[in-house]
Amino acid sequence: MKQELLELWAGGRILNFLVLFTLLMSLTAFLLATNTELHLLDPEQTVVVALTSALTFGLFIGLAIGAESISGERERATLEPLLLTPSGNRQLVLGKFLAALSPWPAAMALTLPYMAALSQGHQVLGEAVLWGALSGTLLAGAFVALAMMVSIWSNSSRLSLFVCLLVYAASLIPAQLPTEFLASPGGVLITLLDPVESSDQLLSKVLTSGEPLSQAWPYLASPAIALALALGALFGYAAPRLRLTARG
């Protein structure tokens, strides 16, 4: 993990992603503060919009790093020395998993000034930090684990990144569906099955509508289950089968 963190952070790859993240968050905050229609939103709503944007941008960073974590080593012919170390395959994958997850806390920290400015001193800020950190960590862990599984079985980094981007795009589709459909039984089912949309609904219901967790908990269960399934598949099935060459 230390080696991977050094390569990702000192090598500048994560820093480049965080610069892009900051630019996107700055654009989002600027639009929320200056756009005539968006400026009419309550502080709770603007904070939720900024937080969901941070989740969307932050997940992409972990997904991109995870997608290249194994297949990239295989392409650079640096995977063999790693597999010859005393560490087992699960330890190797765990180190890379934790390193790929490291940008999320930094992205969340970079989001705080934007949410503080948009909250205008409203008490929603504290709750937004708590729920954003919780749901974001669950989602980031699930997406990084999924990306690493794809990377383990892919022949190239391009293929793994392409597959991961398809999954990422598919997870964002429910947010584009009509509100009337999302309120229907079928829409609620799709929301609960999609951990990203489920997290967005959780933040909206808890922070904007003020619903207690006793009512909104199903929307938290979805990303938690997704994380458990992704970790189980990664460390229980994919990691022990890590090989120098991808399957044909």
Image: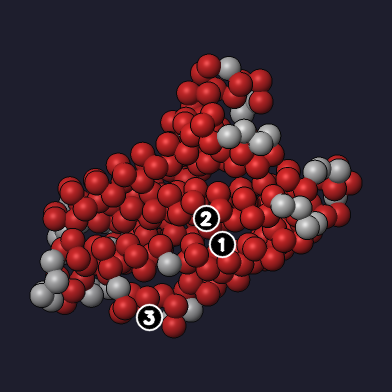
The quarter of the rendered structure image containing the N terminus is bottom left
Question: Disc 2 or disc 3, which is closer to the eye?
Answer: 2
Question: 226 left or right of 207?
Answer: left
How many other residues sit within 10 Å of disc 3, few (<14), some (14-19) or many (≥20)? few
Measured as percent of width and height from the top left, residue 202 is found at 56, 38
Q: Say which quarter of the image contains residue 85.
A: bottom left
Disc 2 residue type?
A: Ala
Task: Name the one closer to the observer, 65 or 30.
Answer: 30
Measured as percent of width and height from the top left, residue 100 is found at 38, 64
Whether label 1 touches label 2, CB < 8 Å = yes
> Which label number is shown at residue 108?
1
| Outermost residue to the bottom | 10
Can I make out residue 154 in this image? no
Q: Say which quarter of the image contains residue 178.
A: top right
Disc 1 residue type?
A: Met
Whether label 3 touches label 1, CB < 8 Å = no
Q: Residue at x 39, y 42 (%)?
A: 224
Question: Disc 1 or disc 2, which is closer to the eye?
Answer: 2
Q: Residue at x 28, y 68 (%)?
A: 95
User: For the residues marked 1 and 2, what is the alpha-carbon distance in whole angstroms?
Assistant: 7 Å
Measured as percent of width and height from the top left, residue 148 is found at 31, 56
User: For the residues marked 3 and 1, what is the alpha-carbon distance in whole angstroms?
Assistant: 20 Å
How many other residues sit within 10 Å of disc 1, few (<14), some (14-19) or many (≥20)? some
| Earlier residue among tags 3 and 1 | 3
Label 2 sits on residue: 133
> Which label number is shown at residue 6?
3
| Earlier residue among tags 1 and 2 | 1
Q: Residue at x 34, y 49 (%)?
A: 146
| Outermost residue to the right | 36
28 is higher (above) or lower (below) than 210: below
Helix, strand or loop at label 1? It is helix
Helix, strand or loop at label 2? It is helix
